[in-house]
Image (tube, helix red, strand yellow):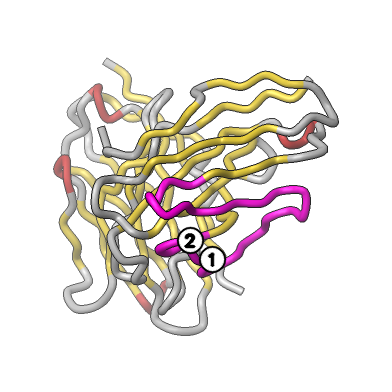
């Protein structure tokens, strides 16, 4: 069965510093991979998704993610974090042909001044 | 604002009771999904409907049921509620239900079972 691991429960980054959130997946075939963000009291918003092709995916709000098959990873990056990026970030995998997203446990990002 | 609406925002009820959560998808979207977010289980897929028919099922308890109506809104019914059912329930919608579609999430309904 497919699964997603986000090893960092909390991460604190200074405003203006770079960010990398880790995501590892387990899935037998080529996965569909997603990053969502959840701000306090809000629903989830899609940041970016990977289906095939270029392994470096650009998303909204200046985020990008890189799919590395050899490492079963799909890490999320941002070169310069803003205070408004403080939120919880979820990595998800979707098996081909279905929409049953399997989510990781999330990483809470705190941004310090 | 994703365009997906959920009512009510908050729901407080007692064990053994039954509640109904409502979701209106984005205009034009045919597929609706339900997810449960709890502290111990995380974010879990419950069920998907496409144009009124059940398309995929996840970790949905037998005490829970859902349906999608002809106007495409959906309801999630939770019965014989237990303390452990306290969670945030999200609805999402997508245009066709295809795996390449983006799912747009509503703000959620927070259910508290006392």
Residue A81 in percent (x, y) is at: 21, 32
Residue B48 in percent (x, y) is at: 50, 60
Residue at 68 percent of width and 55 percent of height: B60
Is B70 within the magenta?
yes
Farthest front residue?
A: B70
Residues in magenta? B48-74
Image quadrant assignment for residue A18: top left
Q: Which residue is mark 1?
A: B54
Residue at 26 percent of width and 48 percent of height: A47
Image quadrant assignment for residue A89: top left
Image quadrant assignment for residue B40: top right
Is A86 within the magenta?
no
Q: Secondary structure at mark 1?
A: strand
Residue closer to the observer: B81 or A1: B81
Work out whether A32 lies above or below A79: below
Residue at 32 percent of width and 30 percent of height: A13
Residue B6 in percent (x, y) is at: 44, 33
Residue closer to the observer: B47 or A90: B47
Farthest top residue?
A: A113
Disc 1 and disc 2 in contact, CB within 8 angstroms: yes
Residue A24 in percent (x, y) is at: 47, 62
Please state the chain letter of the residue tagged with numbered disc 2 in the rendered image. B
Q: Is residue A10 left or right of residue A14?
A: right
Residue closer to the observer: A58 or B32: B32
Please state the chain letter of the residue tagged with numbered disc 1 in the rendered image. B
Q: Secondary structure at mark 2?
A: strand
Residue at 54 percent of width and 44 percent of height: B75
> Of label 1 and label 2, which has the lower sequence position?
2
Residue closer to the observer: A24 or B23: B23
Rendered image: mark on residue B49:
2
């Amino acid at each position: 069965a497919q699964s997603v691991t986000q090893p960092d429960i909390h991460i604190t980054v200074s405003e203006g510093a770079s960010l990398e959130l880790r995501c590892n997946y387990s899935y037998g075939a080529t996965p569909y991979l997603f990053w969502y963000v959840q701000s306090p009291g809000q629903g989830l918003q899609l940041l970016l998704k990977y289906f095939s092709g270029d392994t470096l995916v650009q998303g909204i709000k200046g985020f990008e993610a890189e799919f590395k098959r050899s490492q079963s990873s799909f890490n999320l990056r941002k070169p310069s974090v803003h205070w408004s990026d403080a939120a919880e970030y979820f990595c998800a995998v979707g098996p081909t042909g279905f929409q049953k997203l399997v989510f990781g446990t999330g990483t809470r990002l705190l941004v310090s001044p | 604002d994703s365009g997906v609406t959920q009512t009510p925002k908050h729901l407080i009820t007692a064990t053994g009771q039954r509640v109904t959560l409502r979701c209106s998808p984005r205009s034009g979207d045919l597929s609706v999904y339900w997810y449960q977010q709890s502290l111990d289980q995380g974010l879990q897929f419950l069920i998907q409907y496409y144009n009124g028919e059940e398309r995929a099922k996840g970790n949905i308890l037998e005490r829970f049921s859902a349906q999608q109506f002809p106007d495409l809104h959906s309801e999630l019914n939770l019965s014989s509620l237990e303390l452990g059912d306290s969670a945030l329930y999200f609805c999402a919608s997508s245009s066709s239900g295809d795996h390449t579609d983006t799912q747009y999430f509503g703000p959620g309904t927070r259910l508290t079972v006392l």
